[in-house]
Amino acid sequence: MTEQELEIMKVVWELGTATVRDVYETLLKHRKIAYTTVMTMMNILEEKEYLNKRAGEKAYVYQPRQPKTKVVTAMVQEFVDRVFNGSAQPLLVQLVKDRQLSEKDLEEIARQIKEAE
């Protein structure tokens, strides 16, 4: 999924269901974008099977085909596989070294690991 596709998906996940206009107006609050670009990208996301489309009263209504957690999990796994040969441990080490994880973050990760065990 491209950066722009992900940006659109985040809006649709947040709204639950959305028209092109809904997504366009949401994105417009943060940056300039053409309505036709949003429409094209949402059609591409439908073709890629990330969105379902149905006819609404005045416009097509889109909704996610998969929950955000499922898509994000697949994206993270693909990144870990591609960059770290399938091992998440070097990713966490890199985040700690780059100070991307605070002490509070590390404590929360440790807590979640214990819960998962």
Image (cartoon, rainbow, N blue to C red):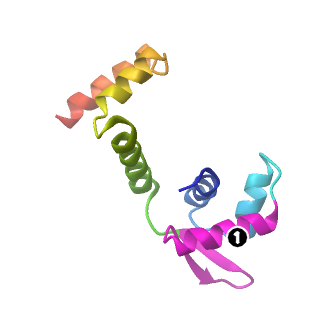
Residue that appears at 29% across and 28% down = 89
Residue that appears at 79% across and 69% down = 36
Residue that appears at 29% across and 23% down = 110
In the rendered image, the residue lying farthest to the left is 117
Crowding at dot 1, Cα within 10 Å, few <14 / some 14-19 / many 20+, comes out as: few
Residue 72 visible in rendering: yes
Q: Magenta span covers which residues?
A: 34-63
Please say if 41 is above or below 28.
below
- Is 6 on the left or on the right of 22, as rendered? left
Percent of width and height locating residue 95:
43, 23
| The C terminus lies in quadrant | top left
Give the image quarter of residue 80. top left
Would residue 67 be counted in the magenta stretch?
no
Residue 105 visible in rendering: no
Name the amino acid, label 1: Thr
SS at circle 1:
helix
